[in-house]
Image (cartoon, rainbow, N blue to C red):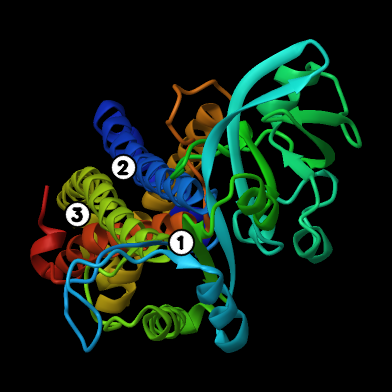
Amino acid sequence: MGFIELIKQVFITLGMNKLRSALTMFGITWGIASVMLLSGLATGFSEGALSNIRSLGKDVVIVWGGRKSIATGSARKGETIRFDEKTLDALNAKAQNFSFSPEVSAWQTDMRAGPRLFNTRLAGVGEQYGELRNVVPDHGRWISRRDINEARRVCVIGDEVRKKLFGEESDPLHERVLIGGREFLIVGWKSAKKQGSSYYGPDNDVVWIPYSTQLALYDRYWFGNFIFSPYDIEKHDLAVAEFKNIVAKVHKFEPEDPEALSLWDTHKDAMETAKVFDAINALMVAIGAITLMIGGLGVMNIMLVSVVERTREIGIRRAIGANAIDIVKQFFLECLIITVIAGAGGMFVGWGLIELMNNVTLPEGISPPILSEKTMLISAAMIGLVTIFSGLYPAIRAARVNPIQALHHE
């Protein structure tokens, strides 16, 4: 039987019971669409969650000083650890696997530009901070090493600060403002940043100045925290251990002391989040696969009914020379055509639903689904599995029909 005749035979088989055939093919179509949509939603949620974590900075670790819980030598248990210039000098001299920046805790302060006055957050930071925390300004420049060495009164502002001081459409670059009653020059500003996580507050509401300037203005000798990020993500754990060892030598505590340092490791958070969403993705695909397998059972039912209805035809084909393999090929190819047509329709429907959700306004915090290559491959694999699952048994059963009995079948 040629391919064209085979396709005709498939449609004749489907046409014998239009409602049953339509419902069966709908099961395959909706099963594939479900797999695509659920997998796309899980991928979208995962990317959204990871994006929220990375908005804080790619693979950054934020470190605060704690209290010593292990007494060693001259170190007393319960002693507070405060990062200072000695900490910074040691890191500058010995850090090999990571870039870092000190940060003076963001304080609330008055800020004025002309008649406009409001309260905002002020953070003293280093020259690497902008890249580490994804706050490199879109306009102007970031704080330089010279700004820090000379304790210059320059600042970089977030988008909300810009709007409150100068208005929506303003460009405040090189404008002078008063911060805590002292004059500063705006050398850069950062456009609105989408941020899903923070530790002192949203970056849009911050004014950044050189850490040396803030320490001098407020007569303070210690930093609130450090942030760092490994040069090579494969050496993340090595970078964390190196940071602990350097700081431990300066402040005389055991690097393994669990209370000496408080770390927020966004890389580990991202890894854990990815694992959770991989599990959710697998669950959603499994739910879609169950729906698909139910459709596959429907296809198997159609093929088994077709075997019974065409028993005499099978006997005639065997009588004129067709062997068992020819019969298996015929019925399996028929099943393949049914599942491919229905599966292709399902992929089209799934793609349409994903595109629809990407073009409507979703509630705050809900990430749109993502149609990834992985999702497409999973869907195509599902079509193949359903074809094998629902077509092989009826095809083998057809091949096992006794030719003599088949010729006497009514």
Residues at marks 2 and 1, CA–CA distance in whole angstroms? 15 Å
Q: Which residue lies furthest to the right in this view?
A: 174
Calculate the distance from the C-alpha at mark 3 to the C-alpha at mark 2.
Answer: 25 Å
Q: Badge 1 is on which residue?
A: 377
Q: Which mark is residue 307?
A: 3
Question: Closest to the observer: 160 or 293?
Answer: 160
In the depicted structure, whether residue 164 falls above or below residue 341: above
Q: Give the foreground label among 3 and 1.
A: 1
In front of the other: 4 or 168: 168
Residue 259 in picture, x, y percent from top left: 23, 67
Q: Are marks 3 and 1 in contact (CB under 8 Å)?
A: no
Looking at the image, residue 109 lies above or below residue 390: above
Q: Name the residue under label 2.
A: 31
Q: Residue 131: horizontal and vertical position, in percent?
A: 67, 60
Q: In which quarter of the image is residue 206?
A: top right
Amino acid under label 3? Val
For residue 238, side relative to residue 253 (left or right): right
Please tell me whether residue 379 is drawn above or below residue 205 in the rendered image.
below
